[in-house]
Image (cartoon, coloured by chain):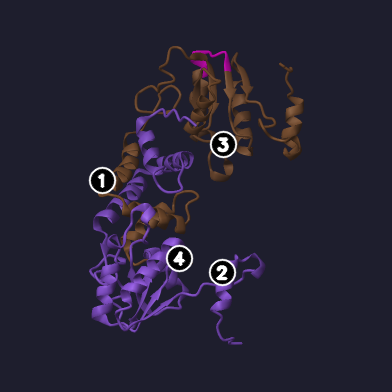
Chain colours: A brown, B purple
Amino acid sequence: MNQAFPSTLLEEAVSEFSKLPGIGKKTALRLVLHLLKQHTDQVERFGNAMIRLKHDVRYCSVCRNITDHEICPICANPSREHKQICVVENVREVMAVENTGQYNGVYHVLGGLISPMDGVGPASLEIDSLVQRVATEQPDEVVMALPATMEGDTTAFFIYRKLAAYPVSVTTIARGIAVGDELEYADEVTLGRSIVNRVAYKG
Amino acid sequence: MNQAFPSTLLEEAVSEFSKLPGIGKKTALRLVLHLLKQHTDQVERFGNAMIRLKHDVRYCSVCRNITDHEICPICANPSREHKQICVVENVREVMAVENTGQYNGVYHVLGGLISPMDGVGPASLEIDSLVQRVATEQPDEVVMALPATMEGDTTAFFIYRKLAAYPVSVTTIARGIAVGDELEYADEVTLGRSIVNRVAYKG
């Protein structure tokens, strides 16, 4: 669809919105027109929130999570288990694991996954800082909570090899049938892994 | 899901994004983290495009369409048929009708539809300015291109009554079976209207 914009300002705003992942031209126009209907101070709050975040964002000097301070609230919390480091792709996964309420260790945020297709190599991720941390902090366990994708598996294997020289137990989150899912709809690889990695029945 | 944001700046940006229609907290976080990965000037371009649009946007003094000038390109175009006014809800519908290439008249943008549920009455729409235009410009035809919803029908009926005092032909776009659609899947109202409003077969 050739969009004949009646205003270049409108066209620019729509063009910026449609650069976001999963936002097409039509959705972008809908969102821009919605914002245009709001009060000026609301629109300024929207635009400036993003600019301010980009300017003032900091990354925890220990785990590289997004934070407002030198050290993030999780790393600064003395009641967390600092000998257990969970390796995740991004801040989203930190939040997802935190929301389970099942983990009391600390994190290490890689900032992405190894992906030769996208030109992301190990050097552009926080892998060296993880190895450095393992060397100095001497944790008991590194839990890899990476996605079960090609990139996730590649990254996990790369880290596993890097950590082999250190006396640390490297584990990975369980792959298996999601809670509430029917077995017949699960793919064979997942079902297969869930059988191989079966655990003792706890009643 | 209770989101434990590690940074208030991040939380604010996500909160602003999730005020947009159809954008939930998870999508907002995804979009904000995507923007955070971009260069600073790209993020500033994004934030400022919206703020600048809000500050500098103008509405055509004739048809109320969004424009950069006093009068929009369509109203300023002498080769358009100025005796034919198409009434639409918003700039999106102007663009949609323009994209068909089937209309060479001008527009009148209402800026919304009558919706008592949302507290939108006729006075907050550009209906008076339409009546004023019909009175002074004396067009041959007013084509109503409003959605086939309760709000659209209410607005069309209200405008129809307002224009009854003037010697203008008021028409409405055809409702019927969409091109490419099967008859058996059409709802009865649409199919019924398409039979009542049948047109001469043109081979």
Q: Is label 1 in contact with label 2 (beta carbons under 8 Å)?
A: no
- Residue B132 versus residue A60: which sits nearer the camera? B132
From the viewer's perspective, is the residue at label 2 or at label 4 nearer?
2
Distance CA(mark 4)–CA(mark 3): 49 Å
Distance CA(mark 2)–CA(mark 4): 13 Å
Q: Which residue is mark 1?
A: A41
**Dot placed on the residue nearer the N-terminal end, 2 or 4:** 4
Q: Which residue is mark 3?
A: A114
User: Mark 3: few, some, or many residues within 10 Å (few <14, many ≥20)?
Assistant: many
Q: Which disc is residue B147 wearing?
A: 4
Q: What residue is at 52 percent from the left and 30 percent from the top?
A: A96
Distance CA(mark 3)–CA(mark 1): 41 Å
Q: What residue is at 34 percent from the left and 37 percent from the top?
A: A53
The chain to which mark 2 is attached is: B
The chain to which mark 1 is attached is: A
The quadrant of the picture occupied by the C terminus of chain B is bottom right
Badge 4 marks a residue whose secondary structure is loop
Disc 2 marks a residue whose amino acid type is: Thr
Distance CA(mark 1)–CA(mark 2): 43 Å
Q: Which residue is mark 2?
A: B190
The chain to which mark 4 is attached is: B
Q: Is label 3 in contact with label 1 (beta carbons under 8 Å)?
A: no
- Give the quarter of the image for residue B84: bottom left
Q: Is label 1 in contact with label 4 (beta carbons under 8 Å)?
A: no
Badge 1 marks a residue whose secondary structure is helix
Badge 2 marks a residue whose secondary structure is helix
Pointer 4 and pointer 3 on the same chain: no
- Residue A201 versus residue A112: which sits nearer the camera? A201
Span highlighted in magenta in the image = A134-141
From the viewer's perspective, is the residue at label 2 or at label 3 nearer?
2
Q: Is label 4 in contact with label 3 (beta carbons under 8 Å)?
A: no
